[in-house]
Amino acid sequence: MSDQKIVIVGAGPTGLGAAYRLQELGHRNFRLLEARHKVGGLASSETSPNGFTYDIGGHVLFSHYPYFDRLFDTLMGDEYQELVREAWVWMCGRFLPYPFQNNIRHLPKEMVLECLLGLIEAQRTPIDLARIENFDQLIHKQFGAGIAKYFMMPYNFKVWAHPPRMMNKEWIGERVSTPPIERVLGNVVLDKDDAGWGPNNTFKYPRYGGTGGLFERIVPYVSEHLSLNTRTVGIDAARKEVILADGTREPYDQLLSTMPLDKLVAITEGAPDQVRDAAGCLRHSGSFIVGVGVDRPAGTSKCWMYFPESDAPFYRVTYLSNYSPEVVPDHTRQHSLLAEISHSEFKPENRDTIVDQTIEGMLATRLLDESDVPKIVDTYVIERDYTYPTPSLERDAALRVIQPWLESQGIFSRGRFGAWRYEVGNMDHSVAQGVEWVNRALLGAVEDELTYLAKRGC
């Protein structure tokens, strides 16, 4: 592979991770193509005209990979914040500690009883995964009717913008806490908070530039190979050429694509009907990310909050200025909030009214009060059509058709939307997918099946 031409489409975490690894191994014959004017993809950040920096969603940096940890240390030095997670759930007019299912004691007593009885009933019989057909059924089997009713079902619809019955059960992994009934009962009886669960109970955050500040720091290492404002519009698999929007063609021996998998199939010449049909089965949602800057200190150390109920359009809000003082113009007197609102064909949202809806929701959930409204000095909307690759019922069968055919053509699709596997779509996973693909291409290594399982389709 030492003299083979590698082309990478997309300079998000996966593409940048691959490019960094290529130069680290001394491979110089590659080109990194990015359609936008900046790197980072969904992990980039944007600064409003008023000087507030907002991420594309509530990102935090924690890692499953020593390589990612070393890369972070190399790029960031000591210019980062290290934080202890303070996550909360807004329900019934109050905040309770996250995860919800461990802290139901804060709910009205009738709801506590309903949740406990449902959980006891659910845990009477061990779960037979072979008999569970979708995420909806898994929620009810794991948590019972009460927790499903009050939190799991409404919250997951808010996040995914798809009914849980349309989603598979395989994506869960470490993302959902399933506490034993003894633990839940103990928390209720002893009036004990239980907020330590989760893989990200401590996390890091760049001091400068938001989350995107991390990925901007890779640019000096790969700049001679990087082409911004360079959009890919076609793949000629037979001739092994990437077709660019200006009509030029970029030849390759190996192609790593990080664009959404359905879009990749759509622009690949010669893709068979069964591959195109499979790509048509893939589902996703988009998001409106609404930033709000307020001319007063935050007055809280909260990190982020979840909102399952209908009194707010957002499913999550982050106190982004609590992550770094540099994301607001003057941290001594200002703070910023970052709200996430999903949308899809099942959950349409109106961009024209989304800022007003967000502010109304922040008032309804006491993130702001009426006296704060005149102090709102910034609002900013980031819209993305692709933010969550849905782990739908059809997904795994579709991947088993699409990915092997692409690889037979020397095309490798990786990353959050390239692999179309949300469960390995965090920033560290995405960087690792790029790095591990390079190790495979140049060193003959095997991609870690915990990072990339598309061949197995699960």
Image (spheres, rainbow, N blue to C red):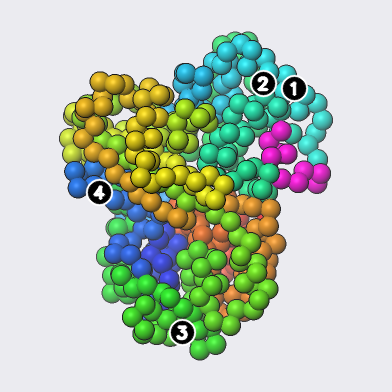
**Direction from residue 435 to residue 125 in the image, left or right:** right
Q: CA distance from mark 1 to mark 2?
A: 9 Å
The quadrant of the rendering that contains the C terminus is bottom right
Which element is circle 4 on? strand
Q: Which mark is residue 120?
A: 1
Residue at image position (33%, 65%) is 36
Q: Amino acid at mark 3?
A: Glu
Number of on-image labels: 4
Is any atom of residue 326 visible in this view? yes
Where does label 3 land, which residue? 241
Q: Which mark is residue 47?
A: 4
Residue 375 position within the rendered picture, expressed as x and y whole percent measured from the top left: 21, 28
In this view, the residue in front, 166 or 331, is 166
Where does label 2 land, which residue? 115
Q: Is residue 138 magenta?
A: yes
Q: CA distance from mark 1 to mark 4?
A: 49 Å
